[in-house]
Every structure is written in C-alpha cells, then in structure tokens.
Amino acid sequence: MQVARKLCGALAFCLLIFSGDGAKADSAAGKQGAIATVHALASEAGLRAMRRGGNAVDAAVAAGLTLGVVDGFNSGIGGGCFILIRRANGRIVAIDGRETAPATATRDMYLRDGKADPQLSQTGALAVGVPGALAAYEQASRLYGKLPFREIIEAAAKIAEDGFQIDPGYFARLNSVVGDLRRFDSAREIFLTQNGDARPVGDWLKQADLAKTYRAIGEQGVDWFYRGAFARDNETWMRSHGGLFTASDFAKYSAKSREPIRTTYRGCEIIGFPPPSSGGVHVAQILNILEHFDLQSMGASSADFVHVVTEAMKLAFADRAHWLGDPDFVPVPRGLVAKNYAAKLARQVRLARASLVSDHGEPERAQQDVFGKHTTHFSAADADGNWVACTATINTTYGSKVVVPGTGVVLNNEMDDFSAQPGAANFFGLVGAEANAIAPGKRPLSSMSPTIVLKRGKPILSVGAAGGPTIISQTLLTIVYTIDFGMDLESALATARFHHQWKPDELMIEKKIGDEVLRELERRGHKLKIVNSLGAAQAVATDPRGKALVGAHDPRLHGKAAAW
C-alpha cells in the first residue's frame, strides 16, 4: 500500500494543480504541421523549426532540446528517449536512446544487508545511467531532418541563457524535491534560493551553464559530450562521489536502431516501440486481447468497459514482470504480441468478476522466437507525411538530483528502472525478474510507449504519455477511445483514465468516471485507488476529413499544441 501511495503521488502531484473535471484538451489545427508538448516554449520551438524549412523530425528534436531547458525536471540530455518516426516515404524508424548501465555495474550493487536500498538507485551518483537522449536526437536530426543540428540546439541554448518564468507547475515539482536538491551544490545553485528554498513562482530561471553546454555541443558536435570534456568532467565528479560510470562508458554509448513492433487493431495498423520498451509490446498485447470484446457496445467509461480493459492490463503487466528486458541481453518472446496468444488470454477474462492473475503466461516458442538483440512525450507531424512520436525522460523528478559542476545538465536516475532485486518493487511499484536484472552496458526496461497509428497505410495518430507505468495505459486508452468510440483527439485525451499494473493489485481510476461506475467496479471485486488526475498525454492526429493536422495537449496540466 505504501508503494501504491508513493506511485499515485508521484504521478499526480503537480497535475492536480491544473486538472479539473470537464477540462478540454488544448488543441491546434493546421495544414502544414502540428506539434503538442507539455510546454508552450517547446511547442513554439518545434513550430519555428518547421517554419524555417524543417520537417516534423526537426520540430521534435527542437522540442526535445527545449524541454531539457524549461521542463528539466522531466527530461533532458542527461537522460534518455525513444523516437518513433514514420517518414514521408512510408518507412518506419525506431531510435533507441535509452540509458545504459556503467561497465562496472553489478546485479547486487544496490543491496545492503541482503535487501535493495531504494535511496541508492534513486538519488545520487550510483543512480545515474549513461545518458542517451542527445545521441538519439542528433541521429534523428542528421539522418531524417532537414535543418543543421547546430541551429536547432543554438535556439534551445538561447532560451537557457535568456531564461523563462517559473510557473506553478514547475514550482510544485521543484518544491517536492527540495530536500534532495539541497544535497548537491550545483543543483542547489541553479534551482534553489540562497536560503535553500524552491525558487518561487514568477522567478526568472536562467541556466548559463546549460546554455554553455548546448553551445559546446553545437560547435564541436556530440563527440564533445560523449568523448570529450563533458565525459571527462563527469568521470572526475563520479570518482569523488562514489559513482561508477567513466569517460569510457560515455565513449562506448551509441543510439540503436530497432525494428518497430507492428500489429493490427480493428482495421488499423499500430506501430509501437520494441524492447527495451515494454510499452510497445504491451499496448499491442492488450489491444490484441481487446479485439475479442465488443467495446463499442459497452460504452466508453462504462463499468463493463473499464472491467474488461483492466483485466487485459493485469494479464499484460504480469507478463511484463517476467519476460521483459533489454533484448540484447535476454530473450524477449515475440509471441507476446501474437494474435493466438491474445486469444488464449482473452478466454481468461471473466465479465462478471475481477480475476486473480497469479502468474505470467507463456507464449508459443517463448525461448526461440525473440526480439533481436519521469518522463515527457511530444508528437509532431508535417504536410509531407513525416510523423514523430517521442518519449523522453530522466525518470523521477529531477532524476538523480545530480548536476556535475559547470555543466548545467540534470542527470537521470534510470538505474532504478532495473530490478535491483528480482521480486522487489521500484519507485513506481513495478516488479521485475531476472530479465531486467542489472548488467554492464544493459539498458533498463522502460514503460515509454511512443506509438503511431496507420489506416490504409496513412498515419492518423501519433500518441504517447508521461507517468511511469501509466504511460502504457494512457497510450492504450487514447487509441481505444479514438478507434472504438470515434472520439476526436480533444475528447479522447479528456476522457476518464484508469490503470492496473498487476502488482500491487489495485485499480487506479479517475474519480470523474462517476460514483455509479466506481460502486459497480467494487462490487465486481476490484480494489480501487481513486485519484483526481492520472497522467499526461500528447498527440497529433488527422482531422476527420483528412484535410488538416491537429495537435492536442492533455487537459490535466499546462502545455501547448501548435500548428500552422
């Protein structure tokens, strides 16, 4: 129960400030391009990139680098990302910029007296994985964009240098981790007042060191970050503070091209991100299960609908806990997204009563047919047919809380996404097994779920979300609300959400679903955790007539959709 309370608080803390029943998603429509992010400055940066002759890839990279400035508690070049691209020529590209464990990492590095110590994997030097977001952004820009990368990163550097005004959401996130930030001098100098308090709403936050780092990357290339001064400075700091990763770990890092996951759902093609994302696998798996039920006749947000989707979530998350990990290190069965396996799971769903899912399932040829070796989401599309879904993260709020002096870069705490001890829950309450155990150079399992939906070969939706394991649920529900119920993008993002991750055995659900539905779910045996707000999703879609691109931002928090 303590883990569940921590999870709920972590996901909903600042969202509650802005959310409200009946809120409508912010949206914008245009014929040339559209983008949606969690911050107006990031969306505007993406739109400017397209107006300067760039495409949706340039827009997404510009947004990602800008979010590292104005939304640095969620993401940045000190973290990682997954980028899913549908190119104008129809080719699908998946770029894996997930962090990696240092070469000297060991499976028991967080155990003390035989038990996992979450403080070690969540805060400080030992919590940091080798960042991958910058490598992924640069690769996407170089191979699939139209603008020079140095121009894009310079625009973000200018925002870091000039500063931006702290709003209530930023303050809330900052204030929630003041105690941890005080432990690290460089972080304290940037984000706290001289008295050690959170910088207040309305304060103008300038990040000169981050601007300097961005400009060095623009002038000298990403090698400066991965094989030059930045890497060396990080190694020096880590050595004196008990960290493990070295300049050699940085030098060995590379973003990887992955084969996207492709499945179908009610006449549409669903393109998801493969492992080490669990999101692509389990969005596909849950949709495959749901195809066996007439959701439309149940009605959106009905007790029947919530019950069936919840039961499918439980089955998928039980499989996640056992099977999922970095495919370069462990066999992850392709059969998890097979239609025949989904049919087998669908037969386990009881319509009248919540079921007890005691263990994971076993798809056919599980060992032979395998995949080849806090957070923010943003979506973008352009008139030429380039579509991007990108989810980026440094894990929890302000990641490890570490900023190496002189860099301005907040470093991630993605090492907590490994199974520090098989069977033990991480910050988000997720349980992992041997497949996600720590190993040198390994990428931790992620819930990030950037997804693109095609209909008759043409993209109609790009979607993803933030919020730990609820990313999977939010992405799934947006797809279902859009395809099964024909909702427009604003309605799909505003409709009530819910989430079940197998363990803890608890259905997290927004209270706006209504008392009657909540009572019926309890009658069927569901243990409810009722929340005001759940998650944050961004999406881009085509309008019903296919004549415009529509960007929409989650109504549960401040953000911005932009189009032209």
Image (cartoon, grey):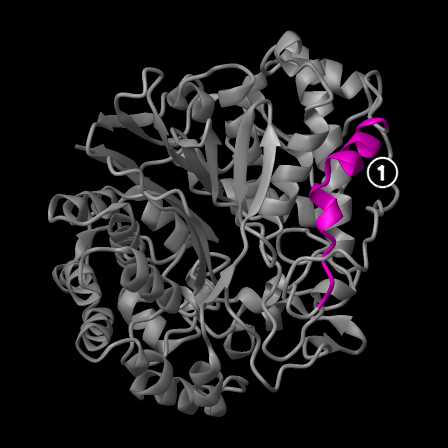
Check the image and report above or below for 125 versus 275: below
Q: Which residues are magenta?
A: 330-347
Mark 1 lies on a secondary structure that is: loop
Judging depth in this view, the residue of 116 and 450 nearest the camera is 450
Amino acid bearing label 1:
Val
Quarter occupied by residue 132: bottom left
Residue at position x 81%, y 33% from top?
A: 345
Judging depth in this view, the residue of 348 and 416 nearest the camera is 348
Q: Is residue 505 left or right of residue 232?
A: right
Q: Which residue is mark 1?
A: 357
Judging depth in this view, the residue of 373 and 281 nearest the camera is 373
Q: Is residue 532 visible?
A: no
- On the image, the x and y values in percent for residue 227 come to 36, 86
Does the magenta stretch mainly form a helix, a strand or a loop? Answer: helix
Location of the N terminus by quadrant is top right
Judging depth in this view, the residue of 553 and 50 nearest the camera is 50
Residue at position x 36%, y 16% from top?
A: 544
Check the image and report above or below for 83 versus 11: below
Location of the C terminus by quadrant is top left
- On the image, the x and y values in percent for residue 315 come to 77, 38
Asked if residue 263 is among those painted magenta in the image, a careful observer would answer no
Q: Residue furthest top?
A: 297
Asked if residue 339 is among those painted magenta in the image, a careful observer would answer yes
- On the image, the x and y values in percent for residue 480 come to 56, 24
Check the image and report above or below for 105 versus 335: below
Q: Is residue 360 visible?
A: yes
Residue at position x 28%, y 28% from top?
A: 549
